[in-house]
Image (tube, grey):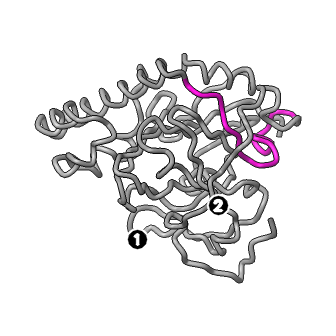
């Protein structure tokens, strides 16, 4: 992959690209998560900058879905009992059918999508996080929003709703923009996993090896915060991750990525975490 020229400015929306399907390596043994290097943010997920993680079990997936739905109902009660009842009687994947009965932007604001501590504690006891600890050593999940506990953030993307996904970005850009502090000697790594919907028609777009290349951008704050690439988005090799429900994709904090447009007839439900670990550099 060549360097991205600052002179090339391409305004194509990455979300609308129909890229090839990503077939990442993994799951790899915990000792290979850093590609043979010492644990560090730079080496997270090796040369490709992404790896498939071990799947949550079917029972764990069912528990996670139930906890997300429970949280949605409880959050909706703050706005409307009618909205809460509508969500309680609707499957997660069919949320779009009743989303006009709720204030979607308030219900699923960034802080509204952060799961409460009790749910985070339950999910952190699941098998995937045993793998994480073997791979990176003692770790914790980030709390860059300052909610007072480790964060697991979920998202519901309705069918064919461009506004439900963000812009092409590196996660490090958010930390730079908001001036979130990284503790000295600490590295970051990302995990994303779909827990509802049709992965083959939605998923996440990622660019393998993009963590190593320059990617100039500017910030647009005229509406919802957006990172606007000052490079040709077709040059970075985006691919779509379509892992089965419960199969995580782990990736470097500088890997370029964005949620795919949901082209299915069901909502895509996913959650993501930032893993904080002791970093050699």
Question: Which residue position holds label 1?
Answer: 222
Residue 92, percent across and down?
A: 32, 37
- What is the secondary structure assignment of the residue under circle 2? loop
Tell which circle, 2 or 1, labels the residue nearer the N-terminal end.
Answer: 1
Work out which quarter of the rendered image holds the N terminus and state it.
Answer: bottom right
The vertical placement of 48 against 112, above or below, is below
Range drawn in magenta? 38-56
Dot 1 alpha-carbon crowd within 10 angstroms: few under 14, some 14 to 19, many 20 or more:
few
> How many tags in the picture?
2
Image check: 182 left or right of 95? Answer: right
Work out which quarter of the rendered image holds the C terminus and state it.
Answer: top right
The vertical placement of 176 against 219, above or below, is above
| Magenta span contains residue 51 | yes
Report the front residue among 95 and 144.
Answer: 95
Residue sitting at x 38%, y 41%: 111
Distance of label 2 from label 1 (alpha carbons): 26 Å
Q: In the picture, residue 239 is in which quadrant?
A: bottom right
Residue sitting at x 43%, y 26%: 64
Question: Which residue position holds label 2?
Answer: 238
């Amino acid at each position: 992959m060549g360097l991205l020229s600052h002179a090339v400015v391409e305004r194509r929306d990455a979300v609308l690209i129909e890229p090839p399907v990503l077939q990442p390596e993994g799951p790899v043994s915990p000792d290979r998560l850093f590609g043979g290097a010492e644990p560090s943010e730079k080496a997270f997920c090796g040369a490709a900058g992404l790896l498939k993680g071990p799947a949550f079990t079917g029972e764990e997936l069912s528990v996670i879905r139930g906890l997300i739905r429970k949280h949605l109902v409880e959050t909706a009660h703050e706005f409307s009992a009618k909205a809460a009842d509508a969500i309680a009687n609707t499957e997660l994947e069919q949320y779009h059918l009743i989303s006009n009965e709720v204030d979607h932007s308030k219900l699923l604001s960034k802080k509204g999508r952060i799961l409460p501590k009790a749910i985070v504690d339950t999910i952190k006891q699941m098998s995937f996080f045993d793998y994480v600890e073997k791979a990176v050593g003692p770790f914790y999940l980030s709390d860059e929003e300052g909610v007072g506990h480790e964060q697991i953030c979920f998202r519901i993307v309705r069918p064919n709703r461009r506004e439900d996904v963000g812009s092409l970005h590196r996660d490090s850009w958010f930390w730079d923009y908001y001036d979130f502090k990284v503790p000295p000697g600490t590295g970051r790594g990302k995990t994303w996993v779909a827990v509802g919907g049709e992965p083959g028609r939605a998923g996440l777009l990622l660019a393998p090896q993009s963590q190593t290349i320059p990617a100039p951008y500017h910030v647009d704050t005229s509406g919802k915060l957006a990172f606007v690439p000052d490079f040709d988005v077709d040059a970075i090799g985006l691919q779509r991750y379509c892992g089965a429900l419960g199969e995580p994709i782990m990736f470097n904090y500088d890997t370029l990525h964005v949620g795919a447009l949901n082209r299915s007839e069901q909502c895509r439900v996913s959650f993501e975490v930032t893993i904080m670990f002791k970093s050699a550099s």
